[in-house]
Image: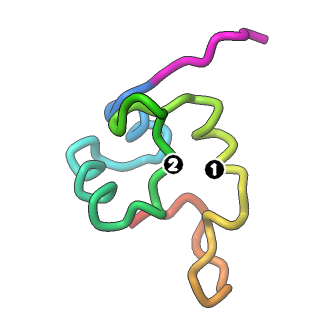
Amino acid sequence: METTKKVIGYKELAEILGCSPKYLPVLRREHPERVPPHTRTSKTKWHVDTVNEWLKDDKNNKSSRGRPKNKYNIF
């Protein structure tokens, strides 16, 4: 297990989430709850470990009323 955290940008995050890299800035502005938390130093960079933990967490894949959403559906 590596001790260094790999930092990814829009392109790599779009591959993980399964959407277009051009759509991510719009998604981050309009629906910040649907994008994983960014790094402390940059709002356009993410740690891979944080993204994976965010995807595993059930809270992030449910609607506000408690109905389960389609998993990993960010649109």
Could you classify mark 2 by the number of other residues whose Cα lies within 10 Å: few (under 14), some (14-19), or many (20 or more)? many
**Residue 69 in the image, given as x and y percentages of width and height:** 59, 75
**Residue 68 in the image, given as x and y percentages of width and height:** 66, 79
Could you classify mark 1 by the number of other residues whose Cα lies within 10 Å: few (under 14), some (14-19), or many (20 or more)? some
Q: Tell whether position 54 is magenta.
A: no
Give the residue drawn at x 61%, y 90%: 65
**Identity, as a three-letter code, of the amino acid under mark 1:** Leu
Where does label 2 land, which residue?
36
Dot 2 lies on which element? loop
Where does label 1 land, which residue?
55
Residue segment shown in magenta = 1-7
Residue 8 in the figure: left or right of residue 64: left
Give the residue drawn at x 57%, y 29%: 48
Q: CA distance from mark 1 to mark 2?
A: 8 Å
**Residue 57 in the image, given as x and y percentages of width and height:** 72, 56
- Nearer to us of marks 1 and 2 is 2
**Residue 45 in the image, given as x and y percentages of width and height:** 40, 31
Give the residue drawn at x 43%, y 25%: 8
Q: Tell whether position 2 is magenta.
A: yes
Quadrant of res 41: top left
Outermost residue on the front side: it is: 41
Q: Are marks 1 and 2 in contact (CB under 8 Å)?
A: yes
Considering the image in quadrants, where does the C terminus appear?
Answer: bottom left
Give the residue drawn at x 71%, y 50%: 56
Mark sitting on residue 64: none
Is 8 rendered above or below residue 55? above
Colour scheme of this structure image?
rainbow
